[in-house]
Amino acid sequence: MIKEQTFVFDVLILVCLIVIAGMIQVLFPSEIQWDLANYHYYNAWAFLKGRLGYDIAPAMVNTYFNPLLDVPHYLMMKTWGDDALVKFVQGSYYGILAFVFYKIVGIFFDFRKEPLAFLATFLIGVTGFSSFSQLGISSNEIQVSILILCGFYIVLKHIRDAQRSKWVWLVSGLLMGGALGLKPTVVMYCVALGMTLIVCAKPLAVNRKEIILFAVCGLGGYLLTNGWWMWQLYSKFDNPFFPFLNNIFHSDYFGDFSFRDIQYISKTTWWQKLFLPVLISFKSYEGDRYLAENAFWDLRYALTYFIALYLFIRWLCQGRKLPEKHYLLLYVFLLFSFVIWAYLFSIMRYIIPVEMLSAIIIVKFFQKLTLSSIVGGAILLSLKIIGFYALISEVPYYLAVWGNSLPFMKTEKINLPENALVKTYGFPIAMVAAQLVGDQSNRIVAYANGNVGENIDFLEQKKLSKVREEIVNEHQGPIVSLITYNINGKDAAFFRNAQIQRKKLEKEGMYCRVLQNYVDIVDICVPQELKEQIFVEPEKHRKLRWNGDAEVSMDDRLKTYLRETNKILNK
């Protein structure tokens, strides 16, 4: 009877969280424009149209990512556009994630005995920057975080209750391996949990067979979600992880090195890595953004860091007595996850599970922190209340993406000739190109697509560039060029190169003008003799929002960015 009541209550909680999260996205829509414009939309479109290898890297490296997670959002956008239903579904994933975290919190806090601690932990966990900023976003971080935390919850409950079941390792392995196959950036959690089970096997009472079963099932989950895509990549590019790990597979289409996104870790010194949680909390911008993707202020990282230091020192001073099994699993898993994250990425949206689980450490520490005197107790209680308010209110209230959702599907309609080749210059541009091509068979080839580290242009790699040039040289029909200015990147050199490219095409006799869209400033250049045929309506200045402020014309949007560009160039 108690189990039945618990199940019904859990279902009600899940439904409520889904509705709340969905309605937040409907009322305060948000979207990270860059990634959706660059590859989330294009990858799903290209996958459903069978265009792998047909187009040449319009979304640069991201062109070759597993597209499965992007398909549902793409289909909803194609069916309902920017309708509230799409926003609700996108937001609902966060409700599911919050429910999984709610179940994890229940392992450490009994709601009937510690309701305030339970609620405080839950609220702190679901309002962090990394997680809350992804509510409704097309990045798919929420979806894979659901799988990771589900897998961790199963193991955590098993360890706490001292259960002996092979199903625990089978299911948790499948979940975490499946998440890794869908999005490789969760590799740190799979490795961290495996390392935790190995290092702490004896105190956690985990035997070798269980660890092996977990690893094998993890591999099975990975192949289940990504094996088919690995085969596609191998059959076309001779590398099942293309363009990654090419130092091992030596595909002729790419250089003999493994691509790695180091834009946020390449400039960090050893002491910055040592105090990274503190720097994240108080100074996420340093020079040219090496610590995070967006500026924010969030105490939880620094708090967790100092609490962890205190617990470690206390552990050393108290004869190295280990905590309860489920706490040991949590502590070591978080430590390994954060260290691997800092070494491999330092990209904030990848750290959602760590951020949420850190709330347990914070609340448990302050729950045990007491003072005997009345005055001291009152001061401590006040500080706890202020700290709690700061943790749950700062990030959601000041989040930069609130209200920044734009109608991405409203790209200007043109009559693209069936025999036209589409050239793209810069990024993000793949979404616009995909919308223009639609159901037609026009090929898309990319130029000036940025570098992959050490100033190496991804599109100038061996056979990839040769195939592109063969396509262009053998093409018999007209060429339509798209040039993006990447205004959200605020890169002066990028902006200037786009202007140079447009002038170059105009000198070659092409007719260029602004393509009306809600993604970026995009110029379209077509043959002079086809401009009347291609453009359905004359060029006009459609009202567009700029960074969530009052609506401004395309000209004003351009002038705003030009002013910022001039400031950068004149520094």
Image (tube, rainbow, N blue to C red):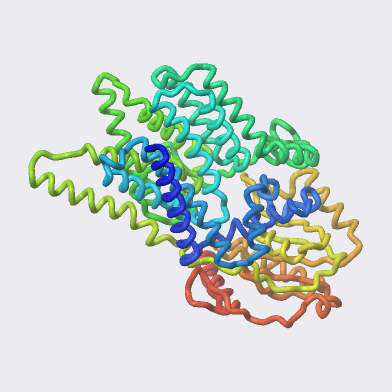
Q: Position of residue 150 (x, y in %)?
A: 49, 38
Comparing 553 with 140, the one in front is 140
Residue 266 visible: no
Residue 218 visible: yes
* Total numbered circles: 0
Which residue is pictured at 78% across the width and 36% down the height? 238
Q: Position of residue 484 (x, y in %)?
A: 66, 65
Q: Is residue 205 left or right of residue 522?
A: left
Which residue is pictured at 73% across the width and 70% down the height? 524
Q: Position of residue 19 (x, y in %)?
A: 46, 58
Quarter location, residue 330: top left
Comparing 117 with 334, the one in front is 117
In the picture shown, does residue 496 fall above or below 169?
A: below
Which residue is pictured at 74% across the width and 56% down the height? 446
In the picture shown, does residue 401 fall above or below 191?
A: below
The image quadrant where one finds the N terminus is top left
